[in-house]
Image (spheres, helix red, strand yellow):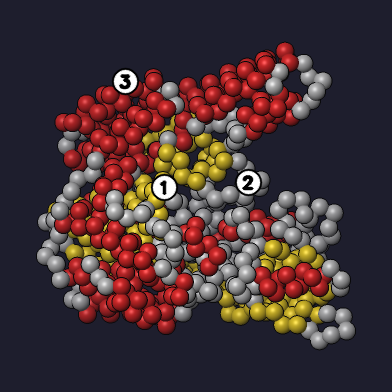
Amino acid sequence: MFSLQSLIARTKELLRFGEIVAGSDNEFKLVEYLRDQFERLDLDVDLQRVEVLTWIDKGSSLEVYVPGRQHIDIPAAAIPYSPQGDLEAPLVYGGTCLKGELDGLDIEGKLVLVEWFKDELDDVKYQYLKAVERGAVGVVVYDAYLGRLLRRIVITGTKDYRFTAAPPPPVPVISITREDGLFLKRLLEHEELRARLIVETEVRQGSTGYNVSITFNGKREEEIIVGTHHDRWFTAVVDNTIGVAMLIELANALRKRPPPLRTIKLISFTAEESGAPGFSPWYWIYGSRCYLKERLSNDDIDKIYAFLSVDVLGTGRPIISVAGYELQALAERLTQDVNAEYEPLTSYSDCYSFGLHGIPSLCIHTIPSYLKYYHTNEDSLEKVDLKLLQDASHILSRLLDALAYQGQSLDYLYYLQVIRRKLRELKANVLDFQLKTLINYLKNAKEHDIRKAFKVINQAFYLPCLLGYYEELYKPFITIFLPQLEILHDIKSLKRALIYVKKGDIEEAKKTLCKIPPVRIVPGFEILLPSINVRPLIRLLNEKSIKSEHLLKLIRLFLSVAEMEGRDSISSLEKLFKIVIDVLKGIYDVRIPRFRYVGTLTWALNMEYTL
């Protein structure tokens, strides 16, 4: 649809705008550039104003004083949302701060040198918060990778990831390169060091960011949206300047084609990297959330048939993150000749905003293979795999052609077959009747009602989860399909543990129980999904004085509670299937989903709907 040569040239042109923070002067300059480029193509441009939090690093430095020597200047970059500060204090080494490394270490009133946690880069906020809890007046984080890298990943002031406002981070925090961090660590093994940390940042509440969109009207009202984001840390070629360049080149290519069957919208979002007001811990994908909030208030969100996006196209094979097996079936069929990997919808990109509304959504990315340069000053054009760009462009072009120009329908029956396989795998046979009824009504339902029904399913069945407590589990959110029924896996594990204890094999019983997470959290909503905390059981298994008869009784008690959770979960899904069937029958008009955790044992998905 467009050449790699023009894509690279466009990317180079976009780099001249520097770092683009939501609500900043640089963003406004880039938005004006985008508007000019689209208007030159005789396209009408719509600018949606979005109120954002703007955080800007205006210059940061670290001066280290070594006894008997001159001070050492260390290059540094402030980590968002660091407050400003100018302070001098002793410098001490705190490891990663995460796994008891601060125990017995006096860091109160001191600057703490911290090694960036490599296993999950986003968890730098927990490293920071642990240091702050112990009284650190400033935090210096050196990178997890060699390569003279300075990195920015947002730090907020609370351990959770609520969508609402929260306290800001209280003390300054900067990043330095791994090379400089290891040098300071070696010095600290033999010397007592003092350091001066200077952080000059600007925070503006109530700034204005912009979502930029253009429309190619089709013969139908249904819309295919292709989206990317234009805010970025440092120059950020891969995240996501290439995506913006691709959007411009796509607009140029589409302008030369006849009108599509389905309307096409191209949107560049603000505030994907940061910008949610009030230092919200869920600071990302705010621009796209605001876009959909406006579409919902205008009562035209149902026009959106599917959302396609690209983000972090760097190296390795493309990963296609999807919400909706009806869309995944089409993508798999169109990309058989491309070495692509599929995964459930990632909650770390704009496609999750659309997934929250049940809209079939897809993002092409390579985040895992590009972590070394992710959000760093070395995210540059030389790192990009051109073959990957070509593959990603082909995938996007084929999907857009099939959905917008050929008007292909999504495979909803395939989706229900996937659900059936999942239910049989979990032996949730009680839901089989509802599923068969759903399949029967699908055959005769109207297209409009089918799309509404499957939006309900997508909203309920794709949820990001944290399998454990925030303060203990340093892993990314994972999206689970049908997470409400994960408790059935726990029931199986409890039954296996019961068998092992009967056999006297306590070690295998412990291994089995350790696979059960103590809690399942849906970040953002901060709700709990069905789970059973078996840690007390695991502790008792370590007590050799406990008789096996007592252990067996306790495991049976835990199993009975887990089975109650399982029954409640199945009952909730039965209600959900009934709502979906009623939507297919044209009885209900589903409005807005609300997730709610009720009491300690039951979970329900409550839908607001009108008769």
- The residue drawn where x is 21% and y is 38% is 449
* Residue displayed at 44% across by 72% down: 237
> Residue 142 at what x, y percent from top left?
67, 68
The numbered disc on residue 473 is: 2
Residue 310 visible to the viewer: yes
Q: Nearer the viewer, mark 2 or mark 1?
A: 1
Residue 88 shown left or right of residue 30 in the figure: right
Q: Residues within 10 Å of mark 1 (few under 14, many from 20)?
A: some
Number of marks in the image? 3
- Which element type, helix, strand or loop, lies under badge 1? strand
Q: Secondary structure at mark 2?
A: loop
Tell me: residue 195, above or below residue 154. Answer: below
In the rendered image of this protein, does residue 461 appear above or below residue 216?
Answer: above
Q: Which residue is rendered at x = 71% and y = 24% of the image?
A: 506
Residue at position x 84%, y 85% in the image: 69
Of labels 3 and 2, earlier in sequence is 3
Residue closer to the observer: 119 or 37? 119
For marks 3 and 1, give the CA distance.
29 Å
Query: Where, quadrant-wise, is the C terminus in this rendering?
Result: top left
Please state the horizontal and vertical placement of residue 287, each as a whole percent of the image: 40, 62
Horizontal and vertical percent for residue 77?
61, 75
Are the residues flagged by discs 3 and 1 in contact, CB closer than 8 Å?
no
Residue 1 - label = none
Q: Could you tell me how far apart the alpha carbons at marks 2 and 1 are, in whole angstroms? A: 22 Å
Q: Locate residue 588 relative to residue 475 in the image: left or right.
A: left
Disc 3 marks which amino acid? Answer: Phe
Tell me the mark number nearer the camera, choosing from 3 and 1.
1
Residue highlighted by disc 1: 343
Q: Residue furthest bottom?
A: 70
Is residue 44 in view from this perspective? no
Left or right? Give the position of 445 relative to 588: left
Q: Which residue is mark 3?
A: 433
